[in-house]
Amino acid sequence: MIVERKMQPSPPPEHRRVIRFVTFLALSLLAFSCWALVNSRINNAILIADADKTPLLAGDDVDRDRHNTSGDHPVSIPVAVPSSSDLMVGAVRMGDPVVRETPLAGAAGGEGSKGSCDAESAQLRVYLYDLPPEFHFGMLGWDGKEAWPDVRDAGAVPHYPGGLNLQHSVAYWLTLDILSSTLPHSPDAGGGMSRPCVAVRVTNASLADVFFVPFFASLSYNRHSKLRGRDRVSRNRVLQAELVRYLMRQEEWRRWGGKDHLVVPHHPNSMMQARRKLSAAMYVLSDFGRYPPDVANLKKDVIAPYMHVVRSLGDDESPAFEQRPVLAYFQGAIHRKDGGKVRQKLYQLLKDEKDVHFTYGSVRQNGIRRATKGMASSKFCLNIAGDTPSSNRLFDAIVSHCVPVIISDEIELPFEDVLDYSEFCVFVRASDAVRQGSLLRILRGVTRDEWTTMWRRLKEVARHFEYQYPSKPDDAVQMIWGAVARKMHSLKLQLHKTGRYQRTHSDS
């Protein structure tokens, strides 16, 4: 007898697709779980093996670090063995970015290895162009037999000319400092140079934050602007033209059009022919008085102090309120162009006041010595706009602890993002100062206590306006490097955003 087998009805097609999908998903999850378990055990084994190979977290030579060989008997050094959990936390995963922490701008910076300043401890890495000597120390009589002067002996470096030349010697001090940045140094000045680690020289251009052009532009203007003999073009113009040609050929300049370059035309008349051609660079200037805003502006450039020419007062020799009989002091050129006309008006208003010293003066006939004495005996020192908004008179007043009275509406001040000048200066608008009796009323309205508070603050900030070699913490040189570092933060943001699609455009 034939038994008829009943066929079970097959599920509909849509159910079969669901069953296949669920089965595939379950098998996939099972396979992934097995892979993750095996991979985790392999990684742990590798980490433990690495820990056995490197028993010390710091130091490359274990045998050297474990024993003190200076004595007759070796002294055992305990070895710190990290736990597996510590190793897991400290392990760097593939693809994690390596972050170099940068100290806050204006800080003194860290210590490099073995007492030297290096690219990891400094907040600004500077590439120094090796320009021929005629652009820098050759102007000071240096023979140029080596690439750079030997800066290990501060007394043997080429000296900058004195007098008013010193006002704009900023490039000289910056160059000396960056040349010495890689020398061994110690904070206590024992067994090496004592130098803060704010900026350091790097010889690999790919590591640089900024490219420093060591052209002594201000000295070139002072010494080489006049025609000599049968010359049809001044030496100053020739140097500027050669510098422009040199930079335009450099790959580092072409990369960002010079935006990450640092040039120091501190004298208002320096680099007249080249300033527009190199205007993409960051300039270190005394003010913006003779620059159009598309060539120089506060967004990209740094304002640096003049070097003062009067002698700095020590804290213990600074006369107090009662020891300064002169209310207001001014000595300098009275008849000036442009914004300097306010000097003439103030002279007419103040020349007959008994407690005001307002006279013509210059560096001739012991002018600097007389200014040193006059400022130290005055409560207030007038800083009035001349041919340009600024002058070294402000910085002479600061180191004399004579409260500056700034009558210059267009002035830009050094390091004003970290210094509040209203704590140690009095600001008066030019239109207010030239009104009859207005300026004297303001100055005589400052009480003894208010003046003393500003005087004490002057003594605290005066170090920020000192140029010296070797450089010291928070002096003018380090403050300038700090200002450059702060500018570089926003500049790098701009450059990195600009370069987002650089590879896309080059491939297309």
Image (cartoon, rainbow, N blue to C red):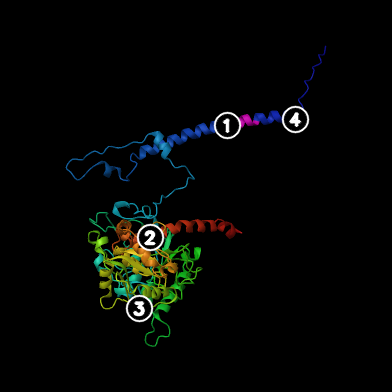
| Few, some or many residues within 10 Å of mark 4 (<14, 14–19, 20+) | few
Q: Residue furthest top?
A: 1
**Which residue type carries mark 2?**
Trp
- Indicate which disc residue 223 carries: 3
- Would you name the residue on which mark 2 appears? 481
C-alpha distance separating marks 4 and 1: 26 Å
C-alpha distance separating marks 4 and 2: 73 Å
Residue 227, given in percent of the width and then of the height, sits at: 39, 84
**Left or right of 32 on screen, residue 201:** left
Q: Is residue 24 above or below residue 158?
A: above
Q: Quadrant of residue 399?
A: bottom left
- Indicate which disc residue 31 carries: 1
**Which residue type carries mark 1?**
Ala
**Which residue type carries mark 4?**
Glu
Residue 57 in magenta stretch:
no
- Range drawn in magenta: 24-30
Q: Quadrant of residue 179?
A: bottom left
Q: Quadrant of residue 480?
A: bottom left
Residue 195, given in percent of the width and then of the height, sits at: 30, 58
C-alpha distance separating marks 1 and 3: 81 Å
